[in-house]
Image (spheres, rainbow, N blue to C red):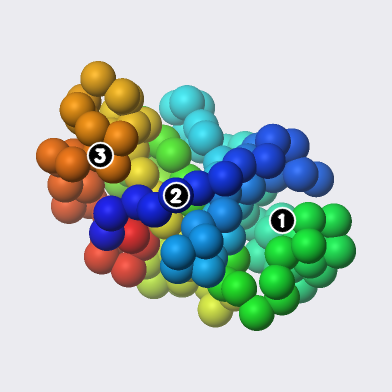
Amino acid sequence: MKPTILTAVVHIGTVTLVACDFRERCIFLCEISYSSQLADLVKRLRQWHENWQGVRDALARDSHVPPDWPVRPWLFVLEGLVALLIRRLQINHGPAGTSGRFTPRITTLEAVQPWLYSSWNRTGEKAKPNDIPLAIRS
């Protein structure tokens, strides 16, 4: 899936970054982790899972996000940690990281380094690693 135009607002509540995809009418709660164990990231996802309706309500109330737009976590981690993240998501959220409340999107940090693609729309971007299940690749 090619990325679309995003607008970001930094530090909304306990979210690192909120990205709004106006073309697809979807909100992404972006989390970036360089941690070797991903403990804080997994903890954050567990907290969101436990209070997902509160997260959705806060987005609607504080950021005027339309309540009918889907909301997904978008996780950015080092490529070498994708397998660990998938295992931790399965333990905490069920198959392929799906919780029934949200399905995260995973992108490797290496894939977003601007010198790896030559155009604004990331044409020529390499495919995501096969470690990432299809349901959470895009």
Disc 2 target residue: 5
On the image, numbered disc 1 is attached to which residue? 47
Between the C-alphas of marks 1 and 3, the distance is 33 Å
Q: What's the CA distance linking mark 2 and mark 3? A: 12 Å
1 or 2: tag closer to the N-terminus: 2
Q: Are marks 1 and 2 in contact (CB under 8 Å)?
A: no
Image coordinates of residue 102 in percent, x first then y, are 55, 69
Give neighbour class at mark 3: few <14, some 14-19, many 20+ (Cα, 10 Å): some
> Considering only order in the chain, which callout, 3 or 1, is on the residue closer to the N terminus?
1
Q: Does residue 73 appear in this view?
A: no
Classify mark 3: helix, strand or loop.
loop
Q: Is residue 5 above or below residue 34?
A: below
Residue 68's place in the image compared with 116, above or below, is below
Q: Position of residue 115 (x, y in %)?
A: 25, 20
Report how far apart the C-alphas of labels 1 and 2 lie in the structure.
28 Å
Residue under pointer 3: 122
> Dot 1 lies on which element?
helix
Q: Quadrant of the N terminus?
A: bottom left
Q: Nearer the viewer, residue 19 or 104?
A: 19
- Closer to the N terminus: mark 2 or mark 3? 2
Disc 2 element: loop
> What type is the residue that disc 1 sits on?
Gln
Query: In the picture shown, does residue 100 fall above or below 54?
Result: below
Q: Residue at x 54, y 78 (%)?
A: 100
Q: Residues within 10 Å of mark 2 (few under 14, many from 20)?
A: few
Label 2 sits on what residue type? Ile
User: Residue drawn 63% across and 47% down?
Assistant: 18
